[in-house]
Amino acid sequence: MAVRIFDNHDLSGHNTFGMKVSCARYLEYESVAELEALDFDSLPSPLLHVGGGSNLLFSGDFKGTILHSAIRYIKYVDLGFDDVPVMVGAGVTFDDFVAQTCSHGLWGAENLSLIPGEVGGAAVQNIGAYGVEVCDIISGVVCYDLHKRKKIKFSTEECHYGYRDSIFKRPENKGRYVVTGVLFRLSRKPKPRLEYKGVREALGGAVPKTPQEVRDAIIRIRREKLPDPAVTGSAGSFFKNPVVAREVFERISPDGSAPHFDLPDGMVKIPAAWLIDQCGLRGASHGGAAVHEKQPLVIINASGKASPEEVLTLERKIISEVENKFGITLQPEVVHVS
Ligand SMILES: Cc1cc2nc3c(=O)[nH]c(=O)nc-3n(C[C@H](O)[C@H](O)[C@H](O)COP(=O)(O)OP(=O)(O)OC[C@H]3O[C@@H](n4cnc5c(N)ncnc54)[C@H](O)[C@@H]3O)c2cc1C
């Protein structure tokens, strides 16, 4: 198959926020060989690689080239051991991978069910939900280095995974690495991760026998709380949960009753949704953009016609009100693209 190229391409269908923006050029490739053969110097710059566009906020038309991977394969390396390596193309929809591995009875990805986006984006973002981060099941990431124009492999350690963070997000690596495939390590042996009370409740207190049972429970929980991108535009959690020193948490909540997670290094993670809620911002809106009623961490394109500026204004309002009330500066999880 040839590389697909479109000029002045509408990006409405390539960002789950549903922002009506365009790019100078849109280029989709199906193999690493096609990627390697591209004449990058002739493309309108800058270059931005996107996946499902489910963590992006375009603040206007993009003047450069949007690259997208259509490398789609799922290969099992089943040698009969408990651990089953699975190599997956970066352009596979992440939830298709989860659905397929759960249906094969493989444990590991089930808690990450229904997260929008593609496998490449998941490895960049280190997606996480219900006590599991994708780095827990990643064994390695294969990339194409746009600076050196050659393939490169990263072990999990070399990816320097952190909370929604990886080496691929470092400013010095911006636009450098294209993820082409991800090696996962799943397990035939039951490994249910039930740290979250909500997950245990959704399973009715029973110990799940299959990853599919956990997947079904997670899907039920997520459908209750989160907007369906096919119906209401959003990019999921707009802000990261702030990690603060214990003294800061004790100042905010002297009796310790505010929701929080104690981290092994003594720091405390506070749910950003709680901080936003405490500022009375649940349901707040600006133009067509609004804070989601069911989950205040999510900004939605409530009218379906919200402009980037309306979302950005609401973002600034949330940051400033949380800062004034708690002295904490929220950091966006959503990648801003200008
Ligand atoms: C309703 C909803 C719920 C969500 N729930 C969760 C959740 O529970 N947990 C969670 O962690 N996230 C969640 N998200 C956020 C989002 O789904 C993830 O961040 C997802 O991994 C983004 O993947 P993507 O393919 O859409 O990447 P994009 O949004 O297209 O891109 C994200 C970043 O990855 C880079 N990128 C993408 N593909 C590649 C590639 N192949 N090579 C190099 N760089 C690449 C982009 O340049 C960008 O910097 C949610 C989003 C929505 C809309």
Image: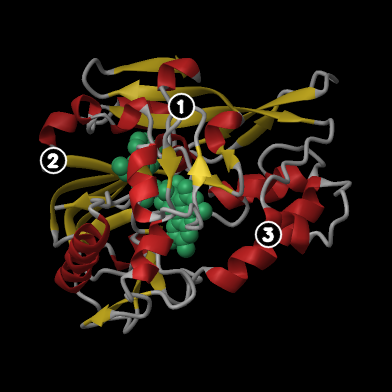
- Spot occupied by residue 221 in the image (x, y as percentages of width and height): 65, 65
* Element class at badge 2: loop
Q: Is residue 85 left or right of residue 40?
A: right
Which of the numbered marks, if any, corresponds to residue 83? Answer: none
Nearer to us of marks 2 and 3 is: 3
Q: Is residue 196 left or right of residue 20?
A: right
Nearer to us of marks 3 and 1 is: 1
Residue bearing the label numbered 1: 265
Q: Badge 3 local density, few (<14 within 10 Å), some, or many (20+)?
A: some
Q: Quadrant of residue 245?
A: top left
Circle nearer the N terminus (3, 1): 3
Q: Quadrant of residue 18?
A: bottom left
- Rounded to the nearest whole Å, what is the CA distance between mark 3 and mark 1? 25 Å
The residue that appears at 75% across and 63% down in the rendered structure is: 202
Residue bearing the label numbered 2: 46
The residue that appears at 80% across and 18% down in the rendered structure is: 79
Q: Is residue 50 visible in this depiction of the protein?
A: no
* Element class at badge 1: loop
Circle nearer the N terminus (1, 2): 2
Queried on whether the Cβ of the residue with tag 3 lies below 8 angstroms from ligand 1, the answer reads no
Residue bearing the label numbered 3: 198
- Rounded to the nearest whole Å, what is the CA distance between mark 2 and mark 3? 43 Å
Contact (Cβ within 8 Å) of mark 3 with mark 1: no
Amino acid identity at mark 3: Gly
* Element class at badge 3: helix
Give whichever of 270, 153 is nearer the camera.
270
Circle nearer the N terminus (2, 3): 2
The residue that appears at 18% across and 65% down in the rendered structure is: 312
